[in-house]
Image (cartoon, grey):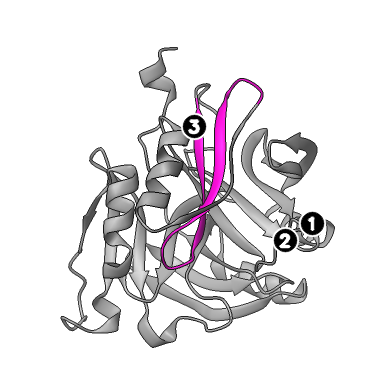
Amino acid sequence: MSEAATRRAPGTPCWVSLLTGDPTTSRDFYRDLFGWEYQHEQGPTGPHFRAVLDGRDVACIRPMPKSRRCLPSWSPFLASDDADKTAETVRLCGGTVGVGPLGTEGTGRVAVASDPAGAPFGIWQDDTGGGAAADGGPGTVVWNELITYRTSAVEKFYRSVFDLDVEHPERDGERAGSEESDYLTVTARGRIVGGIRGVGSALPRDRGAHWLVYVEVEDTDTVARRATELGGEVLVPPGDSPYGRTARLADREGVPFAVISTER
């Protein structure tokens, strides 16, 4: 397979990672909610559980470093053709690099960074075509959305670091200039790969800017009820959207994530 065929366009989410203070509890929660199975591995950023569903890689769950004080969170890893160059651009554009870049046993390089608003994300240079399953299906991550105070504060950062394009889609029922209208879709080489949502004063004070992962499910309402039974919480109850029925949930540590059911 050629290099062009294996590498994803820069800025494309290619992996997601949960940073947690209690990996065992988190592992059990998502196993019971989505049916994930796990393999314990040693990666460049330390030991972690790699989540697998029907033989496909889905995500990883890794312990919070004892040397760093940070909130547990889900974060996407964004593809890069050169992790070292991307990390340097992150710094030049007002972001921070907390870990790496580090080698991944000859297959590429990774780093962990934060944007100027403080939202953590990863950088992944991978030459083997690896990463999370990209074809969707129940139990897999199908969308990544940055929740931040104002899109204009980070738009230039992601455009500059990953050479992404952004668009402001028209949405029925939204008032121009309202907080609800502060939404951008992110495009990598002509393909929509994520979104940026500015929520203004609704941004959680205890969490700040963060990435929200959307996991596809067969029945949003059932999964929302199951999450509470497992010790999680419903942050935004199930409701219909133009893209499917969604709900915003939190796991046992309060880490937010979303689920979506669509008609395929």
Q: Position of residue 54 (x, y in %)?
A: 67, 37
Q: Position of residue 19 (x, y in %)?
A: 67, 57
Could you say which quadrant of the image residue 107 lies in? top right
Is residue 125 found inside the magenta-colored segment of the image? yes
Could you say which quadrant of the image residue 68 lies in? bottom right
User: Decide: marks 1, 2 in contact (CB < 8 A)?
Assistant: yes
Q: Which residue is mark 2?
A: 20
Image: magenta residue range: 105-126
Tell me: residue 6, above or below residue 49.
above
Please report whichever mark, 2 or 3, sits nearer to the chain's N-terminal start: 2
Total number of numbered discs in the rendering: 3
Residue closest to the far front: 92
Q: CA distance from mark 2 to mark 3?
A: 23 Å
Residue closest to the far bottom: 201
Tell me: residue 3, above or below residue 186.
above
Q: Is residue 234 left or right of residue 187?
A: right
Q: Is residue 47 left or right of residue 55?
A: right
Q: Which residue is mark 3?
A: 125
Q: Which residue is mark 1?
A: 23
